[in-house]
Structure formats: C-alpha cells, structure tokens
Image (cartoon, helix red, strand yellow):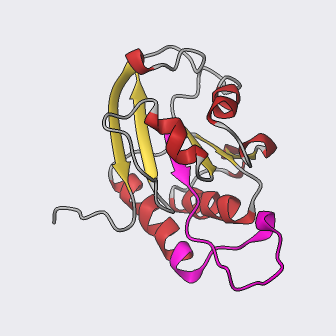
Amino acid sequence: MLIIRHAKSSWDHDGLADLFRPLSERGLRNASTMAERLKKMKVIPELLLTSPATRALNTALIMSRVWDLPPGALQIREEIYEAAPRDLDVVLQTVPDDVTRVALFGHNPTFTRFPNRFLKPPLDNLPTAGVVVITFDTEGWNDLDESRVVDTYVDYPKKKHKS
C-alpha cells in the first residue's frame, strides 16, 4: 500500500475553493520526481484511488503517466477528500483482493495520521508529495493491522538519498 500526499499546491488564485487549488510548479516537478523514484525501486501500484481535489487528482495523474498505467487504474473516490483515518480503512476494504498494491492520494492531517498506525517511529508530518509504502503479510484488504506489517518505507522530495 502506498499513502501519497498530494504535491505542493498553488496559492496564487485568491478566492478559489480548496477543492480546486492546482499544483504549483514545484508540485508538478515533485510529483514526477517521486514517481520516478518509486519506479526505479519497482514500487508501482496497480490501482490508484484519489481524492477529487485538483491537487490530489493531478498528483495521481502525473504519477500514473510516469508509471505507464492504463486509464482504468485511476479512480476518483469522493470519500478521500476530508477523510478521517477510519474512512481510509473503509476505502481500502473495497479494493479487490487480487490487487496486490494500491496507492491512496489525499491530504493532511489524515495522510500523516493514517500511516502512523503502522510506522515506528511515527511521522510528525508527511510533506507534500511524500510517500509512505507499507507492505503487509495478508490475503486481503480487510486484514490490515499493525501485526501484519512486514516493511515500511518513507520518502519525500527533500529527503537526502545516497548517491
């Protein structure tokens, strides 16, 4: 499972509703950079579930293109926008069990709080375009709990990487 916070949004449009805020130039670059990093690691989801907010949807679209996923791999899920962590559990329970890797695209504070259930130590804040990858030993999306975590990985645009 990948938990991906939308990339940096633009605040250049006064009066624009939160739902419609676009990505900034930096956000566009960071979404692509993070997708390339995951592709290099061979961590590519089969299914992308995104908030309908423009900044989350565009982050998902950019990453989907980098990963060369078919259009049907991306689904807009209204309930991810303004979701609480328990709402993401409900969203994940709708994922077919034959899907082995899913990515959720959304917003803070939920996209920091939700993965913290599985992370040791927990994150203070998942930065924009930040990614949490959690691998579980389970047969389905109904069985996600702390005892089934096999591995975790956290990355974000400003994280230092070894050359």
Q: Residue furthest front?
A: 124
* Residue 1 higher or lower than 81, as above or below: above
* Residue 58 shown left or right of residue 135 in the figure: right
The quadrant in which residue 153 appears is top left
Residue 56 or residue 85, whichever sits in front: 85
* Residue 90 higher or lower than 10, as above or below: above
Residue 50 or residue 41, whichever sits in front: 50
Residue 159 belongs to magenta span: no
Residue 69 or residue 158, whichever sits in front: 158
**Residue at the image position 74 percent from the left and 65 percent from the top:** 54
Q: Main structural element of the magenta stretch: helix, strand or loop? A: loop
The spot of residue 64 in percent (x, y) is 59, 56
Q: Which residues are magenta?
A: 1-27
The spot of residue 43 in percent (x, y) is 41, 45
Residue 39 or residue 88, whichever sits in front: 88
The spot of residue 152 in percent (x, y) is 34, 36
**Residue at the image position 70 percent from the left and 26 percent from the top:** 90
* Residue 135 shown left or right of residue 140 in the figure: left
* Residue 99 shown left or right of residue 80 in the figure: left
* Residue 129 higher or lower than 49, as above or below: below
Regarding residue 23, the answer to whether it shows in the image is yes
**Residue at the image position 51 percent from the left and 66 percent from the top:** 31
**Residue at the image position 73 percent from the left and 71 percent from the top:** 21
- Quarter of the image that includes the C terminus: bottom left
The quadrant in which residue 72 appears is top right
Regarding residue 45, the answer to whether it shows in the image is no
Residue 21 belongs to magenta span: yes
* Residue 39 shown left or right of residue 64 in the figure: left
